[in-house]
Amino acid sequence: MRSAAGSLISICEAMNGIMNIDSRLFAPTLNFLSNQNKDRIHQAVLKILAQIGMKIFHEQALELLAGAGCSVENDHIVKIPSDLVTQALESTPKNIAVYDREANHCMDVGGRRAYFGTGSDLIFSHDSIKKERHPCVLEDVSRAARVADALPNIDFIMSFAHPTDCPPQQAYLVSFQAMTANSIKPIVSTAQGRDDLAQMWQICRILRSSEKQLREKPLMIHYADPISPLKHPFYSLDKLLFCAQTSVPLIYSPAPIAGTTAPMTIAGHVAQGLAECFCGLVIHQLKSKGAPFLMGMGPAVLDMASGECSYNAPEFLLSYQAMVEMSQYYDLPNWGYAGTTDAQIPDEQAVFEAGLETFIAAMAGSNLNHDVGYLDFGRTGSLELMVILDEVIDQIRRLAQGIPVDDDTLALDAIREAASEGDFLTHPHTLKYLRQTQWRPKLISRMGYEEWHSAGGTSLLERSQKKLQDILRDHQPVPIRAKQAREIQKIVDQFKT
């Protein structure tokens, strides 16, 4: 059996091959905005920043903005001229190379390459066998990381849970430690503030052996966010400045809620979210020109009938799609969404909604797509749904390969030769292209009714439960070297005290 590290390398190589579309192919795409639409949204973003302004609650950030020529007014309001936005867009890297714990190159975040991973900080974990949910504990973080490590189409991991059995100020750091121990895949981290983020960075430095190696081969991407509408709190900007200083790739993604903290209209929703994101981008690039940055927004939509914030309303999907198209307009790496559902359990609604969102992310060319396995408006996680979506992503990636058209795939010689025989079953052309043309499912059933019934008559959810139990029983992630594990434990223990 191949090692987990070797398997991951081959997966990453295959994924890069898939997303670097063959010159014979017409790459499938999805678009909702015209070029004129994008120009108008861009101009609206610039006007929000230059004429309305943002509230900045961090002295160093205020000093950077004032020193660059921004207008700083009473009540921490800063107005950012358009030329600073243009300069920041120009200096930001168009691609971010990301590496796993073993320093293998895994992702090139940028262009139209689509990667998928779990989400973070869920309150509950759903047990579909017991048909109940429980408050998340640290073991849920470890289990999710181990399952994601085993699934070939999950490219990166987040905590998937916020442990209630840990002191709040320690929860993010011990979750990060659990992720590094249970998976070699790249990590997107969340943190309470600069202090625990700095310790996560130290853990990554230990795993890379030096700061230089960590800068050259980043393992961690960090997620931070402002507060809509138009506010940038101290803790968010403090983490942003730390990431700029240390070259940790940063996601700075607001989550404006249409109808409450952002306009109800999709165009206004997107314009405000992008303006909030670009305020962070300007500060980030003023601190460290050329530091890696991912743009994005969480386009939450408040259901005015239920009071819930939907991850899967059509308006969410349209706003999300618009943000992805704008990221391609700017040629910047983007933070995206996939594999989420508003359903309360991993049922038919869950697979439909999560599958649709994942298809949109892939066809739109969204780069770093998180939250695979989210239920219940982002409150609950399902490992069974994650297992199902691993196969859904695999099938969507087959679609993303497109249709190769050349002399050999048009198969005129095979058609001529096989015509007299009446079938292609034994023709060499069929054997040559069988495996690379036909996608084969592992969970989705393609049996006839009698065969399916004889095999146990199981549902997709039941088959995913069995695969999940097999992973939890059999999969062992590549262990951290003993010396590194001791050094990491020392950092965590010192932070606890």
Image (cartoon, helix red, strand yellow):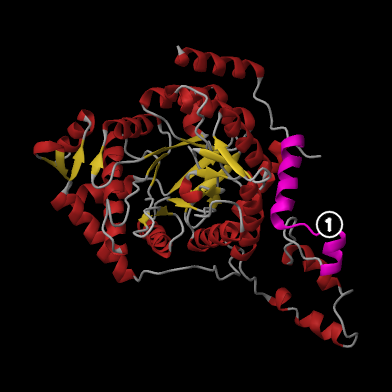
Quarter of the view holding residue 474: top right
Element at badge 1?
loop
Q: Identify the image quadrant of the C terminus.
A: top left
Place of residue 80 in the rendered image (x, y in percent of width and height, measured from the top left): 18, 46
Identify the magenta region: 448-474
Q: Residue at x 41, y 33 (%)?
A: 247
Identify the image quadrant of the N terminus: top right
Indicate the amino acid at tag 1: Gly
Viewer-side residue, 340 vs 81: 340
Q: Residue 233: where, in percent of width, then height?
A: 26, 35
Q: Does the image show residue 207?
A: yes
Residue receiving disc 1: 456
From this view, report whether residue 75 is shown above or below residue 112: above
User: Does residue 22 appear anywhere in the picture?
Assistant: no
**Is 419 on the left-hand or right-hand side of 98?**
right
Residue drawn 71% across and 78% down? 410
> Foreground: 189 or 290?
189
Pinpoint residue 91: horizontal percent, then vertical percent.
33, 45
Which secondary structure dominates the residues rendered in magenta?
A: helix
Note whether 421 is above or below 405 in the view shown: below
